[in-house]
Image: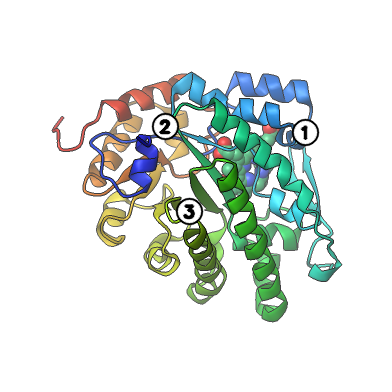
Amino acid sequence: MPGPLLRSLSGENLDSRPVWLMRQAGRYLPEYRALRAAKGGFLELVYDAEAAAEITLQPIRRFGFDGAILFSDILIVPYAMGQNLEFLAGEGPRLSPRLVDAQLSALRAVPERLTPIYDTVRRVRSQLSGDKTLLGFAGSPWTIATYMVAGEGSRDQHDTRAYAYRDPVAFQAIIDAIVDVTVEYLAGQVEAGAEGLQLFDSWAGSLSPAQFERWVIEPNARIAAAIRKRYRHVPLIGFPKGAGEKLVAYAQGTKVDAIGIDETIDPLWAAKNLPANLPVQGNLDPLLLLAGGVELERQTFRILEAFADRPHVFNLGHGIGQFTPIEHVEHLLTVVRGWRRGQSR
Ligand code: CP3
């Protein structure tokens, strides 16, 4: 029998809610920091399949989450497309050459940069019990393109939005190339043992409705269709962070199997406006988990109750912060695990 996370993502409205947290493997865990210090850099960890598998499993051992998410990064895709990738301490990722300065055709693909990741997936699956779901992931084309064009993260994706207006033909070619690699990359993860997939669109919020349609909905719809065609039973979660009311068009247009919602969305609005029975994942504010206290409990119940009439996976609205106290995570899990659908408190 598949575990509760996979059942929820596949459309079952269970009486208690499966839970995992975005960025659950990471710097808030002392066991992560220890292994990170021993191995040196972040990319060194990602490319050491044994270490990456261990890090993927650390939060499962400590908290018993219902899902494990592959330890890797969304920027492995541009790296495999031929850009150089570095993670600078305190500054974040850098890709070069930036596509504001270089043509896409100047990049030489390095597909071997994807294969070690599949090794991590295989190792994790072989060590994970059957009731835990292994999630693979990739970045969505728009978010990946913002890093490829600007060479780094940016507050409002200024360079990439301007590029897309200035030269939509060249930008479409970048998006199409990312779609192709992403489909192969997700398929590789499924072949290696991933049972569900998530598309992270961290910068979906900066686009106008017309740009959102073209650069977010359309490419993600192509990815969803390609994955569904190959792997009918592998659910795909779309997470267009910052999409706001455009979540409705995203859900209808992409036909993802489940939708992740960030903390800016009122759960009652989402429950009312998203397609009936579509599984929802989210949406506790990561800062509320950092802060803890009665408000954390209150909002957790509010989210659980709001989604009682559809499948729901409890999660944050974005990644867990590195200064989050472990006890707050434990407290959250006690609250979520104590809740039952249709039981008044
Ligand atoms: O969720 C998980 O635990 C799985 C692993 C995972 C990481 N990054 C590990 C990571 C996932 C799913 C991601 C996604 C990711 N990476 C996104 C989309 C989600 C989001 O957070 O918006 C983005 C935009 C990136 C790009 C990226 N990677 C940035 C901007 C940074 C530097 C900022 C930061 O938080 O340090 C990273 C590095 C990174 N990716 C770390 C981890 C655990 C920190 C590495 C370290 O210093 O130890």
Q: Is residue 155 visible?
A: no
Q: CA distance from mark 2 to mark 3?
A: 19 Å
Q: Position of residue 239 (x, y in %)?
A: 48, 53
| Residue 73 occupies quadrant | top right
Q: Earlier in the sequence, mark 3 or mark 1?
A: 1
Given the image, on which type of amino acid does mark 1 rest? Glu
Q: Give me the residue at 33% from left, 43% from top.
A: 8
Residue at (37% x, 22% y) in the render:
331
Q: Is residue 312 visible?
A: yes
Residue 281 x/y as whole percent:
39, 46
Q: Is mark 3 within 8 Å of ligand 1?
A: yes
In the image, residue 324 sits, relative to residue 229, either above or below, namely above
Residue toward you, 234 or 273: 234
Q: Residue 168: x, y in percent?
A: 67, 79
Screen quadrant of the C terminus: top left
- The three-letter code of the residue at mark 2 reads Asp
Reading the image, the residue beneath label 3 is 239
Towards the viewer: 139 or 125: 125
Residue marked by disc 2: 66
Residue 245 is left or right of residue 165, and the answer is: left
Amino acid type, callout 3: Phe
